[in-house]
Image: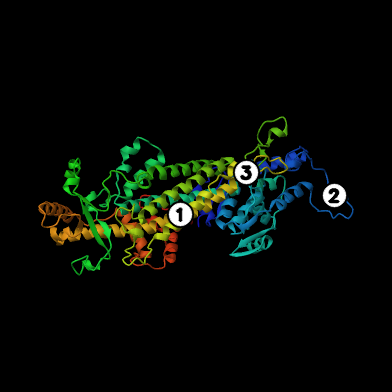
C-alpha cells in the first residue's frame, strides 16, 4: 500500500481516510528540518534559563510555578529519587496523569487518523518536538500499533488532552495497545513491533497531547461516511418518487436557478439524472390504476391469474364534471391511484430543498476541517526565526487547541442528520399508508385474508430511529463545563460533538436502508399494477377493461354507450404505451436490492432482510449504480 507523505501543509480528508484504513505515512525531509530547528531553538532557551510555559513552568493552574534546578521531593524523608531531570519529569507526568479516559476503546480507524493528524501538525515546525520523537510516533503508526483510547474524556479545550495522552503513553511504553488483533500492554506492543520506548524532552508532552486530533479525526471520518449517505439519500428518494409515479417539475433546473443554494441545485440535478428515462414519473393520472384485493374472479386468463392483486378505477360521471370540462378534455374521467393534483407532498416535492440544505451543512464542515487538517493546534507556539527582544515573543501562549471551530461546524451537521432521517421516514410512511400512497395496498401487501402486516412495522423502526436521532441532536458546544481549577473556564465540547455525529451517521444509514427496502417493494407493486393494466388493454376489449371500472352506468342506461367509448379511449391509450419502468439508475439499484432481498408476496420474518438492507447501505454497494459520482469506499481505495 502506497505511503502518504506528510509535510504539515497538504494533508487532505481523503488521504486521512486512507491512512485511517491502513496506509503507512512518510515524513517530508524539508518539514523535518523545520522540526529540528524549533527543537534546537527550544533547547537553547532552556540552557539560557528562559521562563517558558510548559517547558520551565508547570501547566494550567501551575503555570506560575517555575521549575527548580533539582527535585525538592528528593529531600523528603524516605524519598526515592526519580532519576529524571525535572524538565523530563514534567513532560512524562503530563502524559501519564492525563491518560484518564473511560468507556469503550475508539475504533482503530479513529485512532490511526488521530496519530496521522498529530504527526502532520507537528511537522509544521512550531511545536518544539524533536525529529527522533516525531519519527517514533510515525513508526508506531506504520507498525500497526493502535493505542487503546477509551472514547470518553475530552472537553475539547487544551485540545483532546486525555485521549491524546492515551496515544502518547504507548510511545513511552505505558498504557495498552492493539497489535496484530490482540490487546496487550503498550510496552509489549512496542517490543513485538521491534520499537523502543521514548523519553520525552522539552515540551514534547505538550506537543503530543495538546491539539484537536480526536475531534478532527472523528469528524473527518463522519464526513466521509456522510458523503456516501447523502448520495444514498438521493437514490432512496428517487426510488420512492418512481414508486409514487411522482412529478418531476419540482426538480426543474430553471426552477432551482431562482433559489441557487448550492446543495439544492446539486440535489435537483442528481434527481433528474437518477430518474432519467423513467416512464413512471409524470405519467398521466388516469393511466395509474389503484390496488384492489385479489379475488378468484379478478382475472380472465391463466397468465393473468398468476397476479396476486386486482386493479381498478372509479369513473367520473358526466354530471360530476360541471365546471371541469377543460380538465376532462385533457385527462380521461377515471380516478385510479394518482390524485388529480399538480404537486406531490413536501417529502417528495421539497427533496432538493431539504437534502440540499443538509449537503450545505456538510460542505461547511468540510471547509472548517480542511483548514484544521494542516493547522498547528498545540501550545505554546514556537517561532524560532522571529526577531524578538524577549523569549515570550518567540514562544507564544495562545489558544489554537480550542475546538470551537470544529464544534460549531459539527453542531450544524448534528442538527442536519435528523432532518435527513426525518424526511426519509416520512416518505416511507407515505408508502405504507393507503391514505397517502396513491393507490398501493396498505402496508404494501395483498392481505386478502386480513392476516398480514407487510411493511407496517418497518415504519415503526424508522420512526424510533428518527426520534432517537432527534433527541441526540442537542449541540454539545453550547454547554461548557469549566476545567483545570477554572484556568480553562470555557471549553468547546467539540469531541463529544464529533463522536455523536459519527454514531448518528450510522443510524441515519439505517433509516435510509429502511426507505430503500420499502421503496423497492412499492416500486415492484407500482410497475406490476400499471403493466397489468397495459397488458389487459392490449389483449382485451373495452368491455373487459370496463369490469375494472366502478361507478359506470348499467348496460340498460342511455349513458352506457358513452361510458364504453371513454373506456375504449383509456384502453387505447394504455395499449399504445410501452412497458412502464423506472429511471435507468433507479432500475439498477432496484435490481441490486432484489439480488439480495426477494419481493414480499406473503408475510415472512423480515429481520434478516432488514439487516441485509442495512449492510447494502453501510457497504456502499448500491452506490455502484452511480457511474458519474464518486463511490465512497471504506478503505484505501477511496
C-alpha gap between disc 2 and disc 1: 61 Å
Estimate the x, y position of residue 104 in percent, counting from the top left.
Answer: 61, 58
Residue 460 sits in which quadrant?
bottom left
Q: Nearer the viewer, mark 2 or mark 1?
A: 1
Q: Nearer the viewer, residue 370 or 441?
A: 441
**Residue 275 seen in render:** yes
- Provide the secondary structure element on which disc 2 rests: helix
For the question of whether residue 620 can be seen, the reply is no
Q: Nearer the viewer, mark 3 or mark 1?
A: 1
Residue 340 on image: x %, y %: 26, 46
Q: Identify the mark at residue 463; answer none if there is no mark.
A: 1
Q: Secondary structure at mark 1?
A: helix
- Does residue 53 lie above or below 316 as drawn? above
Q: Which residue is mark 3?
A: 33
Residue 502 x, y percent position in the rendering: 53, 52
Q: Along the polypeptide, which appears first: circle 2 or circle 1?
A: 2
The image shows residue 230, relative to residue 254, as above or below, that is below
Q: Residues within 10 Å of mark 2 (few under 14, many from 20)?
A: few
Sequence-wise, the earlier of marks 3 and 1 is 3
Residue that numbered label 2 is attached to: 73
The answer to which image quadrant residue 166 occupies is bottom right
> Quarter-wise, where is residue 373 in the image?
top right
Sequence order check: which comes first, mark 3 or mark 2?
Answer: 3
Task: Give the alpha-carbon distance from disc 3 to disc 2, as whole Å.
Answer: 38 Å
Q: Position of residue 151 (x, y in %)?
A: 61, 54
Amino acid at each position: 500500500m502506497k505511503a502518504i507523505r506528510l509535510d504539515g501543509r497538504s494533508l487532505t480528508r481523503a488521504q486521512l481516510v486512507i491512512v485511517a484504513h491502513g496506509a503507512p505515512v512518510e515524513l517530508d525531509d524539508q518539514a523535518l528540518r523545520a522540526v529540528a530547528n524549533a527543537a534546537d531553538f527550544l533547547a537553547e532557551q532552556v540552557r539560557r534559563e528562559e521562563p517558558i510555559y510548559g517547558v520551565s513552568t508547570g501547566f494550567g493552574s501551575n503555570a506560575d510555578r517555575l521549575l527548580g534546578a533539582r527535585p525538592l521531593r528528593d529531600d523528603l524523608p524516605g524519598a526515592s529519587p526519580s532519576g529524571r531531570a525535572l524538565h523530563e519529569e514534567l513532560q512524562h507526568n503530563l502524559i501519564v496523569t492525563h491518560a484518564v479516559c473511560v468507556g469503550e476503546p475508539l475504533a482503530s480507524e479513529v485512532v490511526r487518523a488521530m496519530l496521522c493528524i498529530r504527526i502532520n501538525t507537528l511537522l509544521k515546525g512550531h511545536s518544539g518536538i524533536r525529529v527522533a520523537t516525531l519519527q517514533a510516533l510515525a513508526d508506531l503508526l506504520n507498525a500497526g500499533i493502535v493505542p487503546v483510547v477509551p472514547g470518553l474524556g475530552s472537553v475539547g479545550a487544551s485540545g483532546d488532552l486525555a485521549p491524546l495522552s492515551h496515544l502518547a503513553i504507548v510511545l513511552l511504553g505505558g498504557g495498552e495497545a492493539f497489535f496484530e488483533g490482540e490487546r496487550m500492554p503498550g510496552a509489549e506492543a512496542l517490543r513485538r513491533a521491534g520499537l523502543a520506548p521514548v523519553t520525552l524532552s522539552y515540551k514534547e508532552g505538550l506537543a503530543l497531547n495538546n491539539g484537536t486530533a480526536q475531534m478532527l479525526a472523528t469528524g473527518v471520518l463522519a464526513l466521509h461516511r456522510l458523503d456516501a449517505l447523502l448520495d444514498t439519500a438521493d437514490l432512496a428518494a428517487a426510488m420512492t418518487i418512481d414508486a409514487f409515479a411522482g412529478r418531476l417539475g419540482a426538480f426543474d433546473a430553471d426552477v432551482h436557478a431562482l433559489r441557487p443554494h448550492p446543495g439544492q441545485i446539486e440535489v435537483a440535478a442528481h434527481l433528474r439524472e437518477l430518474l432519467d428515462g423513467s416512464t413512471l414519473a409524470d405519467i398521466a393520472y388516469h393511466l395509474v390504476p389503484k390496488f384492489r384485493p385479489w379475488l378468484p374472479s379478478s382475472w380472465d386468463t391463466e397468465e393473468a391469474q398468476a397476479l396476486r392483486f386486482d386493479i381498478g378505477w372509479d369513473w367520473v360521471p358526466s354530471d360530476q364534471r360541471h365546471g371541469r370540462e377543460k380538465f376532462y378534455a385533457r385527462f380521461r374521467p377515471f380516478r385510479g391511484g394518482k390524485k388529480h393534483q399538480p404537486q406531490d407532498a413536501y417529502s417528495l416535492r421539497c427533496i432538493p430543498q431539504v437534502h440540499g440544505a443538509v449537503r450545505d451543512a456538510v460542505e461547511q464542515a468540510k471547509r472548517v476541517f480542511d483548514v484544521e487538517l494542516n493547522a498547528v493546534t498545540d501550545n505554546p507556539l514556537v517561532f524560532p526565526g522571529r526577531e524578538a527582544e524577549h523569549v515570550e515573543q518567540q514562544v507564544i501562549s495562545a489558544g489554537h487547541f480550542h475546538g470551537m471551530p470544529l464544534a460549531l461546524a459539527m453542531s450544524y451537521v448534528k442538527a442536519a442528520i435528523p432532518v435527513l432521517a426525518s424526511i426519509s421516514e416520512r416518505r416511507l410512511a407515505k408508502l405504507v399508508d393507503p391514505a397517502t400512497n396513491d393507490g398501493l395496498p396498505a402496508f404494501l401487501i395483498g392481505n386478502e385474508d386480513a392476516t398480514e402486516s407487510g411493511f407496517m412495522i418497518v415504519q415503526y423502526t424508522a420512526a424510533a430511529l428518527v426520534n432517537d436521532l432527534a433527541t441526540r441532536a442537542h449541540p454539545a458546544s453550547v454547554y461548557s463545563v469549566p476545567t483545570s481549577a477554572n484556568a480553562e473556564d470555557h471549553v468547546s465540547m467539540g469531541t463529544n460533538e464529533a463522536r455523536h455525529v459519527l454514531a448518528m451517521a450510522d443510524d441515519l444509514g439505517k433509516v435510509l436502508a429502511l426507505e430503500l427496502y420499502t421503496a423497492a417493494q412499492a416500486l415492484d407493486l407500482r410497475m406490476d399494477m400499471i403493466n397489468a393494466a397495459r397488458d389487459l388493454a392490449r389483449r382485451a376489449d373495452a368491455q373487459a377493461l370496463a369490469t375494472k371500472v366502478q361507478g359506470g352506468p348499467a348496460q340498460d342506461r342511455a349513458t352506457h354507450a358513452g361510458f364504453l367509448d371513454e373506456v375504449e379511449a383509456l384502453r387505447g391509450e394504455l395499449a399504445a404505451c410501452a412497458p412502464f419502468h423506472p429511471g435507468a439508475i433507479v432500475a439498477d439499484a432496484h435490481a441490486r436490492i432484489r439480488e439480495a432481498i426477494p419481493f414480499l408476496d406473503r408475510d415472512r420474518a423480515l429481520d434478516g432482510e432488514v439487516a441485509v438492507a442495512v449492510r447494502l447501505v453501510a457497504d456502499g454497494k448500491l452506490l455502484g449504480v452511480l457511474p458519474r459520482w464518486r463511490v465512497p469506499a471504506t478503505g484505501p481505495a477511496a
